[in-house]
Image (spheres, rainbow, N blue to C red):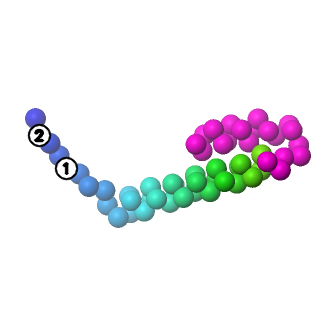
Amino acid sequence: MVKHNVRLSSPEIGGLWGVYIQETMSVCLLNYFLHHLKDNEIEPILQKSLYISH
């Protein structure tokens, strides 16, 4: 069996880091929105979005 040691390139690492930062920000914003929610009809949408971001 041949073992390949494939390393990520700089653009791939940058892309992964960008997605990580975006999802981290999404979690913070969604928690804020849920805490200050005034329209209960959109709560399920925000909860599902938060679940996906986690």
Is residue 2 toward the left or the right of residue 45 in the image? left
Does residue 38 sit above or below 7 in this rendering?
above
Q: Which residue is mark 2?
A: 2
The kind of residue tagged 1 is: Asn
Residue most extreme to the left: 1
Identify residue type, mark 2.
Answer: Val
Q: Judge from the rendering whether residue 3 lies leftward or rightward of residue 42; answer left or right.
A: left
Magenta stretch: includes residue 28: no
Tag count in the figure? 2
Q: Residue at x 63, y 38 (%)?
A: 51
Residue at image coords 79%, 48%: 35
Q: Residues within 10 Å of mark 1 (few under 14, many from 20)?
A: few
Residue 49, position as x, y percentages in the image: 67, 42
Dividing the picture into quadrants, the one containing residue 42 is top right
From mark 1 to mark 2, how far is it between C-alphas? 10 Å
Q: Residue furthest right?
A: 38
Front residue of 5 and 37: 37
Q: Position of residue 15 (x, y in %)?
A: 45, 59
Q: Residue 28 in the image: x percent, y percent?
A: 66, 54
* Position of residue 9 measured from the top left corner of the image (x, y, whole percent): 31, 61
Q: Secondary structure at mark 2?
A: loop
Res. 43 image quadrant: top right
Query: Dot 1 corresponds to which residue?
Result: 5
Q: Which residues are magenta?
A: 35-54
Question: Which of the image's four quarters has the C terminus?
Answer: top right
Which structural element holds mark 1?
loop
At 75% from the left and 52% from the top, the residue drawn is 32
